[in-house]
Amino acid sequence: MYYQGLINKYRKYLPVTDSTPVITLNEGNTPLIKADNLAKKIGLESNLYLKFEGSNPTGSFKDRGMTMAVTKAKEAGAGAIICASTGNTSASAAAYGAKAGIKTFVLIPDGYIALGKLSQAMMYGAEIIAIQGNFDRALECVREISEKYPVTLVNSVNPFRIEGQKTGAFEICDALGKAPEYHFIPVGNAGNITAYWKGYREYFKEGIIKTLPKMMGYEAEGSAAIVRGERIMNPETFATAIRIGNPASWTQAEAARDESKGKIGCVTDEKIAEAYKMLASTEGILCEPASAASVAGLIQANKEGLVEAGTDIVCILTGNGLKDPDNAIKYSNADVKKTSSELDDVLRAMGI
Ligand code: AN7
């Protein structure tokens, strides 16, 4: 049978029965790409792998959690779902809501989500509410609304989201035949680091892997609540996906860090941009800025001597760079040469 999404693939590890109506867009099964060029460029003496979550159906890792959350909402007979979002969650909720035939409400921070993500939510037919406030405020709103009204919350505080997202760890272990020694991941609301750690622990408990990775989570410096140990009231970063100042899964992220003897650090926008460009130019992978925080974190950790040589390292690239063409164009510094359509002019433009 051809691949039919992560619930069907990993059904025995997930809270579904034979009668559960699976809502899927065949998410998951994303490529784990060996990145030798990048490893060499950053002076890494280990095997580097990139898990490209941008190849999910809506272009981000959120689809892993959303197939599970919307499946369970459908099973429970929900009439509507709601989420707050920096963009990717809203795109994913809207798509799975459309597939399930469930009304979808999304709250976004007005002016701070990448255009591709907004266009997705619009096309999938969600009810979009842009608030004058940041993601943290939007999450407070939807939490309150879901408590008072018959609408199911599908942010990562919904435990089914974590269940779906943990399959990313299964795929990595299935591909490598073992767990990596280090797992680098961007941290925003901290649901994904929580989910991966759960996935690794479950495979460990099953005896499928014999070791566990160190969990290395990276926030953007201007939004680094966990690193600073306090809520950031006005989080800032050009990586708008992780422009989050009060992560909902804060304690779980700290537990993942402590139990795995890993780290939660932060990287500047400048270093995120550098990694973002390097990924595209050395590996041919265009991820979105927030995703590059994992690689920026690896570069930093390697410089700090935190990465042992001869190990296997996985960086999660959480979202597709096509969602954010504005930043791609801005940071590429590429020069588009315009000419007439005369062959001589074209050749001159080519430098011939
Ligand atoms: C590309 O879409 O929070 O630490 O509302 O879109 O699990 O929050 C997105 C988060 C990393 C951080 N990379 O993951 C949302 C949202 C990308 C993201 C994160 C997000 P979490």
Image: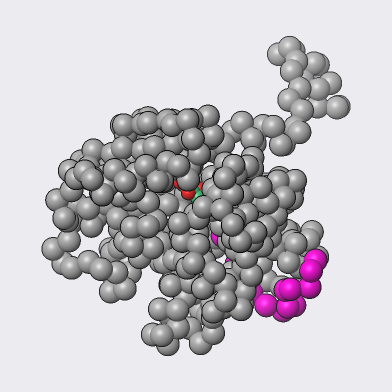
Q: Residue at x 56, y 53 (%)?
A: 231
Q: Please state the horizontal and vertical placement of residue 17, each as a whole percent of the image.
A: 18, 68
Q: Which residues make up the magenta segment?
A: 303-317
Q: Residue at x 84, y 21 (%)?
A: 348
Q: Please state the horizontal and vertical placement of residue 266, each as a whole percent of the image.
A: 67, 57
Q: Residue at x 75, y 15 (%)?
A: 339
> Which image quadrant for residue 304?
bottom right
- Disc count in the image? 0
Q: Please state the horizontal and vertical placement of residue 267, each as a whole percent of the image.
A: 70, 54
205 to the left or right of 312: left
- Quadrant of the rendering where the N terminus is positioned: bottom left
Please say if 305 is above or below 68: below
136 to the left or right of 101: right
- Most foreground residue, 61 or 339: 61
> Which image quadrant for residue 300?
bottom right
Q: Please state the horizontal and vertical placement of residue 352, each as a whole percent of the image.
A: 86, 27
Specify whether residue 218 is in view: no
Please say if 124 is above or below 349: below
Residue 243 within the magenta-colored segment of the rendering: no
Please say if 69 is above or below 348: below
